[in-house]
Image (spheres, rainbow, N blue to C red):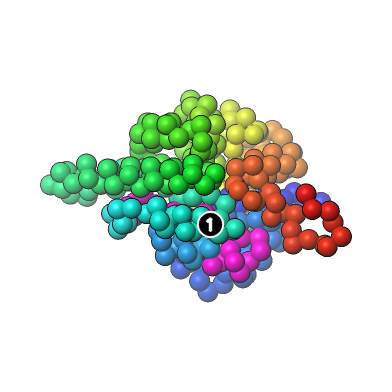
Amino acid sequence: MMPVFYDTHAHLGYPDFEQELPAVIERAKAAGISRIISIGTDEASSRKALKIAEEYPNVFAVVGWHPSDAPEAPEDIRPMLRELAAHPKVVALGETGLDYYRLPSKSNPAAAAKDEGYKAKQLSLFQQHLEVAAERGLNCVIHQRECFEETLQALTPFADKVRGVFHCFANDANAMRRVLALGSLVSFTGILTFKNGQNIRDTLAQTPMDGFMLETDSPFLAPLPYRGKRCEPAYVKEISETAAQVKACSLAELSQATCHTAEKFFRGLGDALRGPEPSHRPKA
Ligand SMILES: [Zn+2]
Ligand SMILES: [Zn+2]
């Protein structure tokens, strides 16, 4: 039997997939990618992720506001998060977190005075995701770039109530251990397959089997041999093959570990696997 994997982070709502979403989801299924989690990055894309999840039984949604889009967000997004979180196909909140890669001062040194406001807005939105997640018993998909310490610091006060997955993880093994120590997880993309991805393979090699998940971050970051092209969920297959080599385990073992981790992390993902049901099967 073909080992099954999940794509725990894809942006199926992006225009890149507009013309051929049914084919993209079909190709994923054919490659053994049985579940796809589609991630929102603002209100419109979160609603779109939900719409796709309503349409396709094997697609689930994560709703939230990406830190890079923070300047366009309302000051208080908690009402929106609470409304969307009530939907049965919402499995987590996000993607949220902190991203200092595009600080205003980086494109224009004269705009340095704007950096503090930009950072404060990101932090406020991140805290709102964590607050609503704690309140609703959900976990958070966390995006972090160039501010690992700040992100960990913001998560820490919530760590007894909310787990995070540090998606597209690109930090070293020491950083990975600090994430896991908070009860959170890491997840790995196609960068794992890149020639210059040895540092990421080293981190994965040291990550315990129950400490990570796999994702594409489609339409970005296509693994080898598709690097540079549009990425799609079917390519979790290539990512899983590299991950199994790095972990020196079989694809079946990797499948069991990563799917089990995802089912525990994402609300309702495990239940959904048992449905839609042949009616004679007992309800768990
Ligand atoms: Zn991200
Ligand atoms: Zn993403």
Q: Is residue 225 above or below residue 169?
A: below
- Residue 206 appears at what percent x and percent y? 58, 28
Q: Amino acid at mark 1?
A: Ala
> Could you tell whether 188 is left or right of 270 in the image?
left
Residue at the bottom extreme, as displayed: 19
Quadrant of the rendered image containing residue 281: bottom right
Q: Which residues are magenta?
A: 51-70
Is 53 included in the stretch rendered in magenta? yes
Q: Is residue 174 above or below residue 115?
A: above
Around disc 1, counting alpha carbons within 10 Å, would you say few (fewer than 14), some (14 to 19), or many (20 or more)? few
- Residue 1 appears at what percent x and percent y? 81, 51
Residue 140 in sight from this viewpoint: no
| Identity of the residue drawn at 69% across and 33% down | 248
| Identity of the residue drawn at 65% across and 51% down | 269
| Identity of the residue drawn at 60% across and 52% down | 7
Quadrant of the rendered image containing residue 119: top left
- Residue 63 appears at what percent x and percent y? 48, 55
Instruction: Please name the residue that numbered disc 1 is placed on.
Output: 86
Residue 213 in sight from this viewpoint: yes
